[in-house]
Amino acid sequence: MVEAEPQSSTSTDAAIPLIDGRESRWFQNRYFWRVSGVVALIGMLLFSGLMVFWHTVEGSREDEQTVRRLVVDVTHRSADIQQWYETAIQTVNMSILHPAVQDFRSSPGEATAYFKTLAAEVPRFSQLRIVSPSGMEALRVDARGGDIIVTPAEGLQDKSGRYYVEAAKSLRPGQIYVSKLDLNVENGEIEVPHRPTTRIVAPIIANNQEVSGYLIVNLDMATPLNAYGVAPGGVMRTELIDHEGYWLAGAEDDRNWGFMLEHNASVKQSDPELWQRIAAVDHQGGFEFDGKIYEVETISVSQMLNAISSDDVHAASTRFHLVGSAPAYQPWAGNIAIKTVFVAFMVMLICGFSGVVGYLMLRRRQAAQLQVLLTKDLMVQGRMASLGRIVAGVSHEMRTPLGNALTVSTTMSDDLAELQQDLAKAREDSEERLEIIEALMMGNRILQKNIERTRELLKHFNQTATDQSVHTQRVFDLAKIVTDLCETLRNQLEKTGIRLSIALPETARMNSYSDAVDQVILSLIMNAHQHAFVGREKGIISIRVSKRDENSYLVEIADNGVGISSDNIDRIFEPFWSLATTTGGSGLGLAITMNVVQNTLGGEIKVSSMPGSGTVFRIVLPKVAPTRMGKHESPFSVESQTALTSPNTSEST
């Protein structure tokens, strides 16, 4: 049953392969996006590769500069510490031999005056004192900035419990003891504000070669250590770490002096892996860890002190670790906004360039496809012209003899009938004669039938070769044309198992040639009926009409039949070409259809097919057919050919 469906509805026969048929715009074309995507991907990869290469080179250069700065900084700080200790030890060596120090028991005032002078001349000494062998302070002079303070007798302290006093008792004449670097303690409490201090101890030898006391000088380390930490205006950090992994200076969040303060913070505890790398540096070396570059110089305190003093020097600390660190090169460090804008600009540039390339490639591909189509159309037109010449020649040469043959056969038929009547009147009923006459009449009828078939074929040729001016242009409804045609064919097709399905808009007004449109659609339906369902008992032919654009309609005639192979689909519009060995056919039907669509209706026809799934004919019909000035010639016709009719031809014969 034929069912007219509105354009917005979906056909019940979803298996039929109907296609849209619209030529997509460039930004809707898959080829454009494929090419643009590939070019964009290549561009992104190249840009990423260049960025990685640039960042690698730039990172290597920046890291090398960072390493050089760290090496210089660590080396300078190591030299500062050595110089600080060297000056202090040399001063102690000279002071231990001074008469005022030698005679501190008999002349304490002279010793105090000497200490005051020494404290004023050597600001790095925060305290000078003499401690008796028992550990009790004999005299002491403190330096507090520009103030020199002499501690009275009642203010002197017992230092017998301090580790450096105990260590000093084992010193022999000429030996020096250097305590570890820690915070100064007064009266059993850590002095506040914290004062980093190293004590240099030397025994005072009396005339009887006995130890009369110990010269103890407090070396104020605040000055050299204050420069540790993050450099002003920079990102480099310098830290001083003792042999146990405790920060002495430069730690973040004020985690210095963990072995004396309650927080007990150390590198060894907070980051064991980093501490292992630092401790593994024997003299000087560097490494990269956790996004930072480290440069480490390990100072052996004993070697350093013995190198700067010819005397035998004993040290409580075994070594210091001078650690300089700075962030390794980070590609996105710095002004992120500018870099983000740059990358976004490059991405947009690459996408834009890839779009241009995709557009140009699409246009080049379309031009190549158009050239192929033009070449194909020229070939078709050439075949049409050849057909026209054949038709003109055959029609000219055959119609006269066919007319004569038809005249003769008609005359013979009349003569045989007259002879048969004469024999009947003469009562000549010879059976042999009657059989001969009957056979002649039968043969004559067969001859006339074949002549008529030949004339019909020539008439078919004439329809192909002559002009189409018989069509009348008028305003009509395409939807009604299709509906009426399908209603007419419904019963005939259903008897053979073929069902029609249509999807039409409510109205589709055209100013064209309704009989030509009817001829085209009928030809395609009958072509599908004759060829699409060979070997099948039933099938579906679907017709859909839709608005292609403002100026044209799209008519799709599809079937779910056997389809057309890719080897044959390009030849179906060729005149006299057909694979219908069992169904018959002259091979002119689709050639005529193409001629009518292109030259009468001003449209175009295309076909797509999938073997085993069906075929779709797509026809684009202008809403207003092109106006023909005068006689419209078929591309089959040849102007210079002799007219197809002959004066000797009798159509009524």
Image: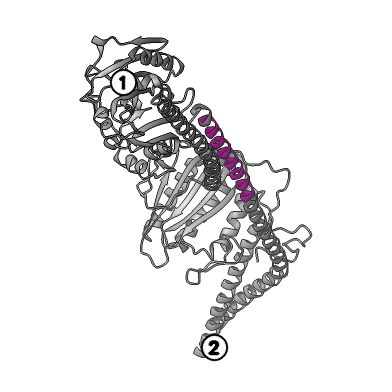
Q: For the stretch drawn in magenta, what is the main secondary structure?
A: helix
Q: What stretch of residues is rendered in magenta? A: 340-366
User: Taking 609 as reference, is 188 left or right?
Assistant: left
Residue 22 in view here:
no
Among the 4 quarters of the image, the one containing residue 270: top left
Q: Position of residue 40 (x, y in %)?
A: 54, 44
204 or 375: which is nearer to us?
A: 204
326 or 535: which is nearer to us?
A: 326
Which numbered circle lies on residue 518?
none
Which numbered circle lies on residue 130?
1
* Residue type, mark 2 in image: Arg
Residue 522 in view here:
yes
Among the 4 quarters of the image, the one containing residue 213: top left
Q: How many numbered discs, if any?
A: 2
Q: In the picture shown, does residue 475 fall above or below 102? A: below
Alpha carbon distance from label 2 to label 1: 173 Å
* Nearer-N-terminus badge (2/1): 1
Q: Position of residue 192 (x, y in %)?
A: 29, 15
SS for dot 2: helix
424 inside magenta stretch: no
Mark 2 crowdedness (10 Å alpha carbons): few <14, some 14-19, many ≥20: few
Q: In the picture shown, does residue 96 fall above or below 74? A: above
| Residue denoted by label 2 | 433
Q: In the picture shown, does residue 286 fall above or below 365? A: above
Q: In the picture shown, does residue 612 fall above or below 277? A: below
Q: Residue extending furthest right?
A: 640
Q: Position of residue 393 (x, y in %)?
A: 73, 67
* Residue type, mark 1 in image: Ile
Position of the C terminus, as image quadrant, is bottom right
The residue located at (46%, 17%) in the rendering is 121
